[in-house]
Amino acid sequence: MIERGALLNYIGGEWRRSDAAESLEIRNPATNSVLASLPLSPAGEVDLAAQAAAKAFSNWRRVPPGERIQPLFRLKALLDAHSKDIARTITEECGKTLVEAEAELRRGIENVEVAAGIPSLMTGTVLENIAAGIDEMMIRQPVGVVGVIAPFNFPAMIPLWFLPYAVACGNTVVLKPSERTPMTMAHILELMQDAGFPAGVVNLVNGGKETVNAIVDHPEIRAISFVGSTPIARAVYARAAANGKRAQCQGGARNPVVILPDADMDMACRITADAAFGCAGQRCLASSVAITVGDASEPFSRRMAEAAAARRIGCGTDEGVEMGPVISAQSRERIQSLIGQAIASGAKALVDGRDANVPGYESGFFLKPSVLYDVTAACDISRTEVFGPVFSVIPANSLDAAIDAINSQAFGNMACIFTASGSAARQFRHEVRTGNVGVNLGVAAPMAYFPFSGWKDSFFGDLHAQGRDAIDFFTEKKVVAERWPADWSRKF
């Protein structure tokens, strides 16, 4: 909720103005206009939210699972009814197109739907007669207060990776949305309020680094769900572990795509272009590099350059726009610098998107898509998560060499292959060391019933977001052994 241009926190069932001494301006990345002011909430306000969540937890955990999911059913209906308005908010503060924003919200709603199955998903196990007259059972109980720290690039979907499962399992939540895109979850929290979640079950605290640290350090918060860059994910995971909390921390990625000579080049290029330049490359499953094997190099590179040059950029609310701006001027400058360094190191720019001008939006943070060929290991761009509309092409002699190149990188979020060979696809699926794998797909985003996997420096933790991993993360297993001898009843 916004009051007099400033975002409010939501604590204990009430919207409250922060006492923060400092604030940030939230800007529309297409126009550079100010949308709202975000308070950098101090640790004291995180404490208020955590205490409200802890108080609510004692009652919420006792609500039967079949009753806990009733607000989720109402929330799903409200999200559907307000989807156009929420998508427009996503576009205004994040920059992606309306089509992309609507698709993001749909994936978030999928998680609400799956979490509504908690009476089945949260069941335990029982074994009778582990010894004479003794039965043993495993039951699941909620963890307690959960902290959710979300990134800017999917302001609706990623919080919904965690929040529905957490509350369905009987936990309460303290959520910190990204300081760059906080308006979307403020809108969704209003809908959660309308859906009938009791006061304190879900709380929202706006802020920056101090707010994050306060969430990770707070003794009442027992679990942390985080998505962001690898350095910050590693730091949050280490700090959470040092504080005795369980944590799931999603980091960065490069998401290579392998193109074999037998691939359908037109299909491979069309799909890969969408994977590389969709959401302006600002997603954790953005395909940022192709490893072309043998004769695939020339036809794929040519088609990819044509697709990049033809992509229509502009404000995401305008008709026909295929790619919006990056999130900020600082992000644009960082991406431009990476492109320049790669070219200086010997990479060939098949398409150089650094000089972007969108009539009517001259103050926006726009880049055109870029395609770089033969990027060497000496380039920073070959090792870092670009998080922008930049695609590199690296030739390789064989599928084995392509797999070795993928497995040698620090990241392990996703890898995809385009081929007509079932044998090659099977070898790739078996040998590649990434948590998500696509075959003739550019974005292997798991449906909500499967975990959003990530390996190596792309993930810190044991249990991922979504699906049964979410149930395991947001519950603790308790094993109970019982003996009830038949003759005891005669004593009472």
Image (tube, helix red, strand yellow):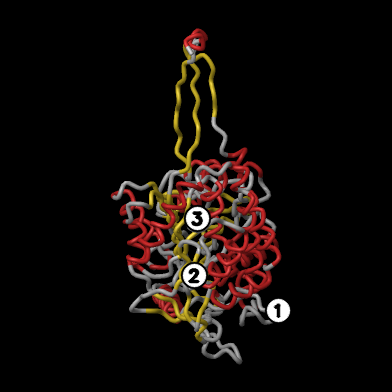
Residue 15: assigned label? 2
Q: Residues within 10 Å of mark 3 (few under 14, many from 20)?
A: many
User: In which image quadrant can residue 272 be found?
Assistant: bottom right
- Report the residue that reaches farthest toward the front: 492
Residue 256: assigned label? none
Look at the picture and state if 119 lies above or below 28: above
Which mark sits nearer the N-terminus, 1 or 2?
2
The answer to which of 437 and 364 lies nearer the viewer is 364
Amino acid of disc 2: Trp
Q: How many marks?
A: 3
The secondary element bearing badge 2 is classed as: strand
Q: Residue visible at 53% across and 80% down?
A: 367
Is the residue under label 2 in contact with that under label 3 (CB below 8 Å)? no
* Residue that numbered label 1 is attached to: 320
Which mark sits nearer the N-terminus, 3 or 2?
2
Q: Residue 166 in the image: x percent, y percent?
A: 51, 50
**In front: mark 1 or mark 2?**
2
Horizontal placement of 227 versus 238: left or right? right
Q: Residues within 10 Å of mark 2 (few under 14, many from 20)?
A: some
Residue 201: assigned label? 3
Amino acid of disc 1: Gly
The answer to which of 449 and 352 lies nearer the viewer is 449
Is residue 74 something one can see in this rendering?
Answer: yes
As measured in the structure, the alpha-carbon distance from the residue carrying label 1 to the one carrying label 2 is 38 Å
